[in-house]
Image (cartoon, rainbow, N blue to C red):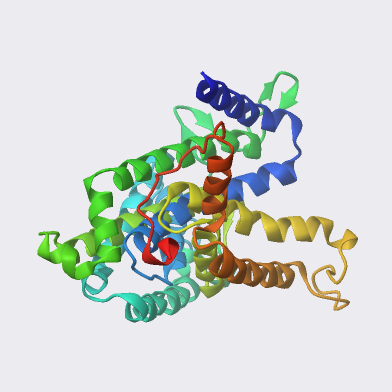
Amino acid sequence: MSRLLIRAGVLAAFVAVPFYLEGFWLQAGLFAMSAAVGAIGLNLLTGATGQLSMGHAFFLAVGAYAYVYFAAEPTGSLGGLGLPTPLAAVLAVVLSGAAGGLFSPIAGRLKGAYLGIATLALIFLGQHLLFNAGPVTGGFNGRAVPPLELFGFVFSDAPELVVMDVPFGALERLWFLGGAVLLAAALFARGVLRGRPGRAMNTIRDHEIAAGVMGVPVARYRAGVFVLSSMYGGLAGVLLALVFQRTVPDYFGMLLSLDYLAMIVIGGLGSVGGAVIGAVFVSLLPQLLTRYGDALPLVAAPGSGDGVSPAEAARLLYGAAVVAVVLFLPGGLLGLLHSLRRRLPGLRLPLSANPTPSPETRS
């Protein structure tokens, strides 16, 4: 009964958010949702399977730009297929998985730092394509994102929609779409981790030789998880494009991939809940520093030169958080919540996959 009450309360709070919070908080929450979807995919690859990837931003870019190209009508020098937007979103996720599939033979044979260096090349390849494939990407200026239209309902500011005397614009409508996408992505990943594939992935991460002796096809699992992680990245890219309403090449660079690594380390490796918590922390921190930078010491407005910019301050805090987690919280913020749960038996943690702890966590 307590679990049902907690879930009902969380659902009611989630539904009530668009009716009471302003656009800044809605946009920040949507960025956190899209980041959480991508972080779940990276955690399946890095946290659960032990495969380091530094090219996750490439697959977000594939998803975002593929959706725009598939959904947009050709205008002037910009191309497009003009497909129905739901079909364009599905094809964008599939194309992200196909891009991961092309790289999967390498992912199936490399591991550790070698795979990390190999995936780093995807970032440079992606940046080159985004800036130079003008008819598809729009070049330096990017492209406008067509709003999603599902069963005649448009996720944009027009046509006007009023619910209980509250105007529902693009952010309010996307709030519920983002929540549904995140919930579906989290439940699917939790099912993977709790099933036979999850046990095989954890075995590969902890004892690769033992996994091979037990009959686990190590190379095939590594390649398959890489494709699945790429599809999660593509889905996050589609959601991010819908929220941003414009795709810009500079956003999908190396810093975004480092942010995703920080998300899964800070939140907790190998679990769905850890990815969500880390994504919320990393994605909301720079926006909060930007909004409230005037009230914080040493934090100045961007471009003023009077102190540390909000983005730089956020990255300094990321670094401090990563060091603190590695030294004092091997299980991340989710591990801290699990320890609190043991001390407070009534505390329930949603979306926790109860993963097999890694050797570092056990130590």
| Residue at x 33% of width, y 49% of height | 91
Image coords of residue 206 (percent x, y): 29, 65
| Residue at x 62% of width, y 27% of height | 15
Label tally: 0
Q: Quadrant for residue 110, please give it.
A: bottom left
Q: Is residue 286 visible?
A: yes
> Could you tell whether 200 is left or right of 279 in the image?
left
| Residue at x 56% of width, y 35% of height | 347
Q: Is residue 8 above or below residue 24?
A: above
Q: Nearer the viewer, residue 197 or 71?
A: 197
Q: Nearer the viewer, residue 309 or 114?
A: 114
> Could you tell whether 357 is left or right of 307 in the image?
left
Image coords of residue 336 (percent x, y): 57, 52
Q: Quadrant for residue 22, please give it.
A: top right
Q: Is residue 61 above or below residue 349?
A: below
Q: Is residue 66 visible?
A: no
Q: Nearer the viewer, residue 93 or 198?
A: 198
Q: Is residue 2 above or below residue 169?
A: above
| Residue at x 83% of width, y 56% of height | 292
Placement of the C terminus among the 4 image quadrants = bottom left
> Could you tell whether 171 is left or right of 305 in the image?
left
Image coords of residue 220 (percent x, y): 17, 62
Q: Nearer the viewer, residue 4 or 244?
A: 4
Image coords of residue 249 (percent x, y): 54, 68
